[in-house]
């Protein structure tokens, strides 16, 4: 028994560095397509709680440009993605951190406390699995019944990935273990002697082994959960651990006799913080709706104005077309009337000229006829003899010559 304790102490010394935040799943199973595991910028993980809320560890926010007041330019990829080279990025717009959070500082023997955080993204992310925060009663039952606890993270999967992380193409991996209550954690630490000396507060934990997978760097922020009746009950956030090699760069692996232990604060402690995040999301959606409504109304107004302008332009064009048609018809009618008037005038003139010519011809004919019927007198002479001849066509007698001719009155 003494030899076993000495071995456990040696192992604890080797693995003590894991009492600082450790965060993929060494020896775990591929979990591509998991509905809740998200990859956060900076090679860390998160758990999709609702369409816009992601639960994670507070210390991972140090890897992003996220301040406690929520200012950020970080982003998150959608759940369950393996190759994220061309994947959509969801912008992080707000972070919520417990006021009780204390960052780990092993050098000054400072224990991390309430290492939990919430980040909010700018638009809905697909959520295909219902999630609830486990109550204290449920967590006690899960621990007592040794319910299967799972965690899916985007961290390293072997030591050789430390030199070539390739996180943009790294698939999520799953580990499984058993939930330990704070009392069970104390018993575990007393039995295996791997409790870090500067720990003062014992929290909840998940115990895992090589067969089921253990956490590595990059898994911080992943969610531990128990799935029952198609609901995932969230029991804690991966962020701190002890008892495994944490994907050593040389590929060697050492595991505590009691298995690897991840520890975390109970999430039901942060229901008020989650409610604050939910209220923030509700206000954001309300603001977005108002803005969308404003845009919609502006678009409708613009469309109505454009339609009215188009209708007015069409009416004006129709009026112009009608006016042009009317003017054209009037011009054509006028031209036709003028042509008809000119034709009538020419016909009347021609008829008049013809009538005048006819009258003149008739007059001349009549005159000629009358003239042809009129008797005239001529004077005829023969030597000293003179003789007058009166007839319609008078002629001098034989031997006489015509001197003068006059008409009868």
Image (tube, rainbow, N blue to C red):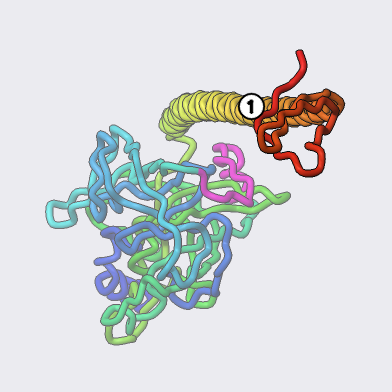
Q: Residue furthest top?
A: 409
| Residue 68 falls left or right of residue 342 | left
Q: Residue at x 47, y 43 (%)?
A: 123
> Magenta segment: does it hold 186?
no
Vertical position of residue 189 compared to residue 155: above or below: above
The residue closer to the viewer here, 234 or 243, is: 234
Residue 216's x, y, as percent?
Answer: 37, 69
* Left or right of 74 on screen, residue 234: right
Q: What kind of element bears circle 1?
A: helix
Picture residue at 38% right of the left edge, 80% below the top: 158
Residue position for label 1: 338
Q: Quadrant of the N terminus?
A: bottom left
| Image quadrant assignment for residue 118 | top left
Relative height, residue 41 to residue 12 (above, below): above
Front residue (pair 169, 235): 169
Per the rendered image, the range of residues in magenta is 124-142
Looking at the image, residue 71 sits to the left or right of residue 267; the answer is left
- The residue that appears at 55% across and 69% down in the rendered structure is 32
The image shows residue 181 at horizontal and vertical percentages of 49, 48
Above or below, 114 relative to 164 = above
Most distant residue in the left direction:
108
Is residue 289 visible in this depiction of the protein? no
Q: Position of residue 138 (x, y in %)?
A: 61, 41
Up the image or down, 67 lies above or below 348; here it is: below
Instruction: Describe residue 148's horizontal placement relative to residue 261 as left or right.
Output: right
Residue at the image point whose x is 33% and y is 58% from the top: 41
The verdict on residue 125 being magenta is yes
């Amino acid at each position: 028994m003494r030899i076993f304790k000495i071995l456990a102490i040696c192992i604890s010394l080797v693995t003590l560095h894991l009492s600082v935040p450790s965060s993929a799943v060494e020896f775990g199973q591929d979990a591509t397509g998991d509905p809740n595991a998200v990859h956060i910028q900076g090679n860390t993980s998160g758990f999709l709680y609702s369409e816009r809320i992601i639960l994670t560890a507070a210390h991972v926010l140090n890897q992003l440009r996220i301040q406690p007041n929520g200012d950020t330019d970080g982003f998150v990829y959608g759940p369950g993605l393996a190759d994220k080279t061309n994947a959509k990025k969801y912008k992080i717009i707000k972070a919520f951190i417990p006021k009780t959070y204390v960052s780990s500082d092993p050098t000054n023997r400072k224990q991390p406390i309430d290492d939990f955080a919430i980040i909010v993204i700018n638009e809905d992310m697909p959520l295909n699995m219902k999630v609830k925060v486990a109550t204290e009663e449920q967590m006690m039952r899960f621990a007592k019944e040794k319910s299967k606890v799972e965690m899916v993270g985007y961290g390293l999967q072997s030591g050789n990935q430390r030199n070539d992380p390739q996180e943009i193409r790294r698939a999520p991996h799953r580990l499984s273990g058993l939930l330990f209550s704070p009392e069970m954690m104390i018993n575990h630490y007393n039995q295996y002697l791997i409790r870090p000396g500067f720990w003062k507060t014992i929290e909840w934990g998940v115990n895992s082994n090589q067969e089921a997978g253990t956490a590595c760097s990059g898994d911080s922020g992943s969610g531990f959960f128990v799935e029952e009746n198609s609901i995932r009950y969230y029991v804690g956030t991966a962020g701190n651990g002890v008892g495994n090699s944490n994907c050593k760069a040389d590929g060697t692996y050492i595991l505590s006799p009691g298995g690897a232990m991840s520890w975390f604060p109970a999430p039901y402690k942060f229901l008020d913080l989650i409610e604050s995040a939910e209220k923030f999301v509700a206000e954001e959606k309300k603001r977005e709706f108002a803005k969308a409504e404003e845009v919609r109304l502006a678009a409708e107004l613009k469309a109505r104005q454009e339609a009215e302008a188009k209708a007015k332009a069409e009416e004006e064009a129709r009026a112009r077309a009608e006016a042009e048609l009317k003017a054209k018809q009037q011009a054509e009618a006028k031209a036709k009337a003028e042509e008809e008037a000119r034709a009538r005038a020419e016909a009347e003139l021609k008829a008049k000229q013809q009538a005048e010519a006819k009258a003149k011809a008739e007059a001349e004919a009549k005159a000629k006829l009358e003239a042809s019927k009129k008797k005239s007198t001529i004077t005829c002479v023969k030597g000293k003899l003179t003789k007058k001849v009166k007839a319609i066509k008078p002629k001098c007698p034989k031997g006489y010559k015509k001197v003068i001719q006059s008409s009868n009155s």
